[in-house]
Amino acid sequence: MKTLRIPSLEDIYQAYGQGEEAVVALVMQMVGQHTELMAVVQQQQETIGRLEDRVRTLEDQVAKNSCH
């Protein structure tokens, strides 16, 4: 994944000075980064869910073994 880069105020003014196409390109770049970031968050949430399930399973196994 690319490093998330938020445009500076200077970047925004520079795009504005370059015209409509530059502003649109800057916004589209930010939207693309947001989409990539959301995909990473989704993957992490799924991984966390699997790990939580695994921890519960292991804790249950330890509890059963401790009782015997």
Image (cartoon, rainbow, N blue to C red):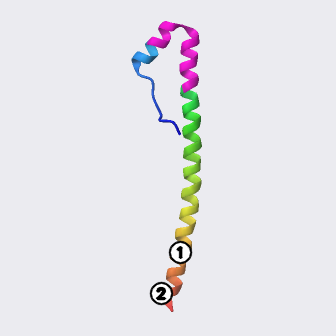
In the rendered image, the residue lying farthest to the front is 2
Which residue carries the number 2 mark?
66
Quarter-wise, where is residue 56 in the image?
bottom right
Relative vertical location of residue 60 with respect to residue 31 in this rendering, above or below:
below
Residue 2: x and y in percent read 51, 36
Q: Is residue 21 left or right of residue 15?
A: right
Main secondary structure found in the magenta portion: helix
Find numbered disc 1 in the image and state the secondary structure of the residue it sits on: helix
Which residue carries the number 1 mark?
58
Relative vertical location of residue 2 with respect to residue 17 in this rendering, above or below:
below
Quarter-wise, where is residue 23 in the image?
top right
Residue 40: x and y in percent read 56, 44
Query: Residue at point 54% right, 64% down?
Result: 52
Find numbered disc 2 in the image and state the secondary structure of the residue it sits on: helix
The amino acid at mark 2 is Ser
Query: Residue at point 40% right, 16% down?
Result: 10
Read off the magenta span. 14-29
The amino acid at mark 1 is Leu
Relative vertical location of residue 43 with respect to residue 52 in this rendering, above or below:
above
Q: Is residue 7 left or right of residue 48?
A: left
Question: Crowding at label 1, few (<14), some or many (≥20) Cα neighbours within 10 Å?
Answer: few
Residue 45: x and y in percent read 56, 52
Question: What is the distance, in whole Å, between disc 1 and disc 2 at their CAs?
Answer: 12 Å
Q: Earlier in the sequence, mark 1 or mark 2?
A: 1
Query: Residue at point 59% right, 54% down?
Result: 46
Q: Is residue 3 magenta?
A: no
